[in-house]
Image (cartoon, grey):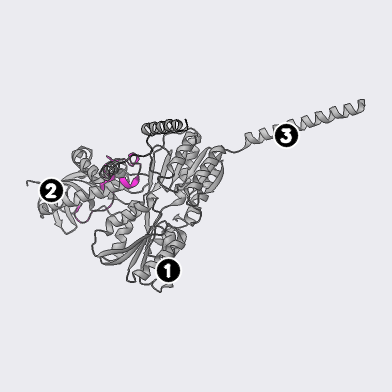
Amino acid sequence: MKTNWLKQMFAAVLATAALLFTQTSTFAEDAAAKPKIAVVVSTLNNPWFVVLGETAKARAMELGYDATIFDSQNDTAKEAAHFENLIAGGYKAVLFNPTDANGSIANVQKAKAAGIPVFCIDREINSTNAATSQMLSDSYSGCVKLGQLFVKTVGKEGEYAELLGIVGDNNTWNRSKGFHSVVDRYPGLKMVAQQSGEFDRAKGLEVMESMLQAHPNIKAVFCGNDSMAMGAYQALVTAGKDKDVKVFGFDGADDVVKSIAEGKIVATGMQFPKKMAQQSAEFADEYIKGKRDFAQKIAVPVEVVTKENVSKYGDYGKK
Amino acid sequence: MRAVRWIIAIVVIAGVCRLFPLFHVVTMKTATAEKMAATFNATQFAETFWTTKLLTSRDKTVKADMLLPAIQSDTAAAKKKFSRSVGLSEGYFYFVSGSGRVVAVSDDETSIAVTDGSTNAEVSLQTGLIFGNALRDGTGLLDANNYPNSQDFNDISAALNHIVETRVLPKLREQAKVGAKISFVGCAEVDDESTDLKPLKVIPIQTETQKN
C-alpha cells in the first residue's frame, strides 16, 4: 500500500516536472519567435503580382521577420477575411497590394485601429489617413509617355481599341486617362472599342477576339497591363493580324519585355515592382523600430520600354 | 383587446420610423447636385489655383540667367540647388523665370536667348500641345499627399495644361516675333541625366512683351 502511494507521488512529481519543462520550452520558443509581417496581394494569378509579393516577403525575411503571403484573388471579401486573420494572428505590419481603391479602405482602417501599420504597394486606396504610407507607380505620367509613343508609332489617324483593367482600381483609370490625355488630342485617332479585360490574360484574349470580329480595321490596341497585352497578342496571332495591329502594354512583365525585344509588342511601361516591394518592407521595419513620419503617397516613376532601349531592362526592373 | 394591441404596436412602429426613417425621398435634382458637390472639380480647382497661387508665385522661381550658366557649369550641382522632384523619380523640375530676345519661332516652340550677349536658343518656350505634370509638380505649390484619390490629382494636370493651351499660348504666338524681347515664367521638366538641356524646354505660365 505504502509502495503504491510512493509510486503515485513519484509519477505525479515527474508529470509536473515534465509539464513545467514543456511550458518553459514554449515560453522560450515564443521569446525567440520572429515578429510577423503579412504580405496581402490582390492576386497571385498574375506573374507581376507574384514578383511583388515574393520580393516583399523576401525583403521582410532578410530584415529578420517571419513573412507570410495572403492571396486575395481579386476578391474584397477574401481580403477582409485575411485582415481579420492577420489582426487576430498578432502580425506587426502589413505590406498591402489592395484589391479595390474604395473597398479596401475599411480593411486598412481595421488594422490601424488594432495598432497594425499598413503600407500600400502599387495600388492606391482613396484615403490619406488610413495607411501609414502608399508607394505607388506614377501610372498617369507613364501612360502620358506611352500615349506620345502611340501617336508617333501608329500615326495621327486610324482606329484603335483599349483594354481597361479592373474598373474599381485607380490604376485602371490613371493609365487610361494618362493615355487619353495625349491620344484624344488627335481627332483622326478613333477609339472604336473600349472594354475591361480585368487585368487578366485569358479575359484579355477573349475581349480582343470579340473586338477583332466587330472592328477588323483597328491599327493598334492599348492595354492597361501586360497580362492583357499578352492575351491580346495571342488573339491577334490566332486571327493572323499580329503583324498589322500594334500592341502596347503596361507593367514591365518579363514575357512582355522579351516580346518587345522580339518585335511582337511595341512598348510597355516599366513599373519596378521589386523596388516598390523592397522599399515598403524597409518602411515596415523602420516603423516597427520606432519611425513614424512617413510620406503618405510616394510616386515611383514609370519608364517606357521599347525595342530601342529594351536591352537596359529585364527581371522586372532595370539591369 | 387584440385590436388595441395592434393599434399600439402600429403607433410605436410609426413613431420609431418617424424618428429613424428607413429611407429618405430625395429629388433627382437634389441628388445630382449633392453628387456634383461631393465630386472633385479639377477645372474649378485649377482655375482658382491658377489665379490665386500660380500667377502670384514668381518670387519662387529661379532666374534663367542664373540657372543656365549653373547647369552648364555643373548639372548635378544646379539640380541639387535649384530643382525639385517628386517621389522616387530620377526626373526633376525647374520653376524658372527670365527674359530674353526671340531668336527663332516654329509651330511648336519659341526660342529665346537669355544670357548677356547670347544669340543662341537657350530657352525654348513650348507652344505645341501640352502634356504631363510639369505645371502641377514643377512649382512645389501642390502636394499629392493632400489628395485621397490620385485621379483627382492627375485631373489637375490636364486642367492646368488646358489653361496654358487656351490662354497663354495664343498670346505668346502673337508676341513671338524674331527680335522681340519677351519675359516669361514657366516650368521645365528634365526626364533624367541624358536629357538635352540646350535649350531648356519650358512650359510657359506667363509671358509679356518688353520694350526694346
Residue B174's place in the image compared with A133, above or below, is below
Name which residue lies at 26% across and 59% down.
Answer: A184
CB within 8 Å, label 3 to label 2:
no
Residue A27: quadrant of the picture: top right
CB within 8 Å, label 1 to label 2:
no
The residue labelled by disc 3 is: A22
Q: Secondary structure at mark 2?
A: strand
Nearer the observer, A17 or B16? B16
State which mark lies toward you, 3 or 2.
3
Residue B54: quadrant of the picture: top left
Q: Secondary structure at mark 1?
A: helix
Name which residue lies at 53% across and 40% down.
Answer: A84
Which label was assigned to residue B182? 2
Q: Residues within 10 Å of mark 1 (few under 14, many from 20)?
A: many
Q: What chain does badge 3 belong to?
A: A
Q: Give the magenta part as a residue range.
A: B125-152
Residue lying furthest front in this view? B1
Which label was assigned to residue A235? 1
Q: Do callouts 1 and 3 point to residues on the same chain?
A: yes
Measured as percent of width and height from the top left, residue A306 is found at 37, 62
The amino acid type, in three-letter code, at marker 3 is Thr
Measured as percent of width and height from the top left, residue A78 is found at 51, 47
The amino acid type, in three-letter code, at marker 1 is Ala
State which mark lies toward you, 1 or 3.
1
The amino acid type, in three-letter code, at marker 2 is Ile
State which mark lies toward you, 1 or 2.
1
Name which residue lies at 31% across and 59% down.
Answer: A147
Q: Residues within 10 Å of mark 3 (few under 14, many from 20)?
A: few
Measured as percent of width and height from the top left, residue A307 is found at 38, 64
Residue A79's place in the image compared with A216, above or below, is above
Q: Do callouts 3 and 2 point to residues on the same chain?
A: no
The reply to whether the magenta stretch includes residue B136 is yes
